[in-house]
Structure formats: C-alpha cells, structure tokens
Amino acid sequence: MTAVSTVHCLPVELDQVSEIKGRISVLTDKEGRLDLGARRVNKLSKGAITRVIESDQFAKAKLGDVISLAFPFGMAAEAVDIVICDRKGGADQMRKAGVALAKARGKSAITILGMSQKGMADFVQGLLLRSYAFDERRTAPIEAFGDVTVMHSQSDSLAAQIDVVSAISDGVFFTRDLTNEPANILTTTEFANRLSALTDLGLEVQVIDEAELEKLGMRTLLAVGQGSDSPSKVVIMHWNGGTPGEAPLALVGKGVVFDTGGISIKPSAGMEDMTMDMGGAAVVAGTMMTLAKRKAKANVVGVVGLVENMPSGNAMRPGDVITTMKGDTVEIISTDAEGRMVLCDAMWFTQERYKPAAMIDLATLTGAVIIALGHENAGVYSNDDRLCNGLLASAQKENEGMWRMPLGQSYDNLLKSRVADMKNLGGRTAGSVTAAQFLKRFVKDETPWAHIDIAGVAQTTSETEHAPSGSTGWGVMTLNTLVQDMFEAK
Ligand code: BES
Ligand code: MN
Ligand code: ZN
C-alpha cells in the first residue's frame, strides 16, 4: 500500500510559519475561527485569510469545501488550502473535511494549522483513511507521500489523540491490504505468517496446523480445505490489556483465501472477487492490530480459520456427512456453503478454550445478504440485545452501516437433513438468515453472540467516502469503538 503513515504533531513556532514548505492547510469553520498558526498565516499574507473568509465565495461554500491560494505572498509555502469544517457536525463531519483535503492535495507535503482542538484528530483520521491506495502489485514507480505535520497550540494532548487515530487507520490499512491481496500471494501459509508478525506489537500469536486441528476434532473446517494444496490453519491472536484472568471478548473470522465453490463450483464470471472471501478474518486481524497499537485496556482474543475452497480429487463432495468439533453431524448439500463450516468449528473451539464474555463472528458469508441489504449495510444477527445494540451504536458512531436481521425456529427448521443432524444449506429463500441459523447451533446458551455478514460491505466496485474501490476495511472502526465503549476498564 501507499498511505500517510505518520503524522508529526508540533507546537506552533510563530517565527517558523513563514518558512513552511509545501502546502499549508488552514482549518476553519463557517464562523471563520482560526488557531494561533493560522492567524500567523493571515498576518504574513497581509490578511489574505480574512479576505477569503469575508468573501462571497466563502459565504457560498459548503462544509468540506477547500479554497486554495497559490504561492501566497510573504511565505515559502507553495499554496494555502483553506478547509471549511463543521465542528458541530461531530466526528463524522470532521472526517469528511479530512477526506476532502486528502482528495484535493494529492501527495504533496502538508502542514495543517487548525482551529480549536476539538475535531482536529477526527480531521486527521479522515485524511489518513482516504490516503490509502493498494499499489503493491504494480511495477510502475510509486510516488511516496510528503510529510504530514500538524502545528497546534495544544500539541501535546493533540499528539496523544493523533496516536490513537493512527492506530485505527493502521488497523484499517492492514485489513485492506490482506483483503486486496490476490490468492496466489496470500495463501493460508502467507496469511498465518503475516499474523505471526503481529507479535512485534505485543500480541501473542499461535498457529494451529492440520495435524493438531485433526486432534482437536475440527473436521468440518478441515473438510473445506482438503481439496487445496494449501494447508488449513487456525490462528489465534491474544491481546491481554485488561484485568488478568478476566474473560475475553472473542472475535472469530472466516478466512477463505479463495472460494471457487469447490465441487459445487461457481460460475466463472466474477469469480476473481472470491480473493476477498477472507475479509472476516482480515477485519479480526486489523482490529487486533489497532487494539495492540493503542494499548486497549481489554482482553480480546481473535481466532481465524484459514482455508482454501478448491475442487480436486481429494475435495469434499455434496452428500458427504461430516462430524463437527461439537459432535453434531452435517450433510453437505453445497460445497459452496463453506464459510459456515469453517466458522462452526472455529466458534466451538473458541468457546471451549476461552469461555469468552461475548463472541462476535465476521464473515463474507452469503450473496443473499447483498440481495437483502446491498452494499450499504452489513447484516447482524444476535442472541443478545445488549451486545447487538452496542454493536449498532458503535457502527452508527463510525458511520459504518449495520442492520439487525431476524433469527427464529421456523428458519432453523429449514436445516433439517434426511441423513444427518443438519444440512449445510437452507434452500433458496432467506439465505443469509439460514446461514446465521446454522452458526447459532454452535453457540452455547451462555455465550452472548453476534454474527456479522459482511459480504456486501467488505469490498466495493466504486470508491466510498473513506476508501478507493476494492477492500473497505469495514468493521475495524466499529469493533474498536465497541471494545472502547463496552469492554474497556474506564
Ligand atoms: N463467499 C460466498 C459468499 C459471497 C458471495 C461473498 C458474494 C461475497 C460476495 C459464500 O461462500 C457462498 O458461496 N455463498 C453461497 C451460498 C449458497 C451456496 C448457499 C452464495 O451466497 O451463493
Ligand atoms: Mn462459497
Ligand atoms: Zn465463501
């Protein structure tokens, strides 16, 4: 990737403002408020900022608009970009203004001179998130970003806030990179290696290989990967920033590095999108990175099932009956309904080993959720109103769409099998609901649980507010906020 990765935060040195090279960005609101450094730019330019603020153009400008002055008089800077922010609109409006600047300025070096402290970190977050591009697999030389510096009268406390937003955008970028990588590069082994590298951040990482998965009885997860030459793996990431011994929040992710459909093979049109079928696992990994980087005061365990769903002489077939780690048997109707088979064992394992205080699984699980909710909202299913409402509130704060979907006995009845305890497919109707219903059979009564079907939101063909086309990193910000609001010692 290329992205702005570090943001320097410095106190305002008034006599240095005239020497700033590159672009200066002056943040103001509709009332024309300016911080110390911005007032100095105004003075050096003999009131150019005031003249803009008093102009018709400013009066007509919308929030998030950028008005640029090229080669400003009295300064070394090549341009001054005046960004009109809406502090009253909350975090999301400030992020939008940051996005606007990211789009307007390209990759040049930039020094940001603010307003008051409120909303400055959110502004920087928008700028960071929108600076991302996945260009790892191109050979053309890539222009790096110039330095980004914030000069502010309250630089110490602002620097601490900017560290937190950098931890968040780093996690989002990790998720996007993993999800954007093609399947010949991000094999199950490469995925596990990239997760193992997170030990550098203080995370504890364990990789479980096929022999051990076999011993644990995770036959259903193994069945999905058995047609592939890439070995199936489960990777566990621990962040123990909370009270020692306290039950963790568990995050479980579907990590199908490529989903051909298996013997129930998919049509070829659009199959290349199935490189992103490990998006749930990538969100878990990105969230764990963010929690470690900001040293969250919570115990969180991330568990991902990494497999590849391929047809071969050794692949599972429709009609096969497989025994899950829980002990229930599953009749395979479609080898393309593989995500639930990975998750059922990963979720059962997680509950048996970690007795989590709550469990959230994320998966690009069904095309049906895209039919139901499009690319605007992920579908969330839950057995616990408190957990689910917490998730919905966090998603709303972060402006990541999420909509609660129903569970119920009559949906569960659709999973009845002629030969086994259940089949892996509910039928043509309510495909996202019956998939959730399948998972629910592997949730213990005492575990507050939510399942998030992210098939529609993990990737887009057109750019979003915060991301270029491709992987969005949807969910890292929501889960980070959920941890902060519901699981962290205050
Ligand atoms: N990985 C797919 C779901 C998916 C579809 C994700 C489109 C992102 C975009 C999943 O494994 C799958 O194949 N689901 C089938 C389920 C069916 C066989 C019951 C589907 O949605 O068609
Ligand atoms: Mn599938
Ligand atoms: Zn899949």
Image: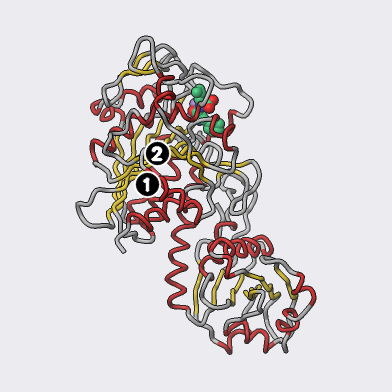
Element under disc 2? strand
Q: Is residue 375 above or below residue 412?
A: below
The residue to which callout 1 is attached is 387
What percent of the width, then of the height, locates residue 133? 59, 52
> Is the distance from the Cβ of mark 2 to the nearest ligand 1 atom less than 8 Å?
no
Q: Earlier in the sequence, mark 1 or mark 2?
A: 2
Residue 173 visible in the picture: no
The kind of residue on which mark 2 rests is Ser
**Label 1 amino acid?**
Leu
Q: Position of residue 307 (x, y in %)?
A: 41, 30
Q: Quadrant of the C terminus?
A: bottom left
Q: Position of residue 458 (x, y in %)?
A: 53, 42
- Pointer 1: residues within 10 angstroms few (<14), some, or many (20+)? some
**Toward which corner of the image does residue 2 lie, by quadrant?**
bottom right
Residue 143 picture location, percent across and down = 63, 58
Distance CA(mark 1)–CA(mark 2) = 8 Å
Is there any visible trace of residue 487 in the rendered image?
yes
Identify the residue at horizontal 57%, vertical 88% (top origin): 14
Closer to us: 347 or 43: 347
User: Which one is nearer the viewer's eye here, 378 or 225?
Assistant: 378
Question: In the displayed structure, does residue 485 sit left or right of residue 51?
Answer: left
From this view, report whether residue 363 is shown above or below residue 13.
above
| Number of numbered markers | 2
How many other residues sit within 10 Å of disc 2, few (<14), some (14-19) or many (≥20)?
many
In this view of the protein, which residue sits in the foreground, 222 or 459?
Answer: 459
Q: In the image, what residue occupies the spot 48% across and 20% down?
A: 262
The residue pinned by badge 2 equals 382
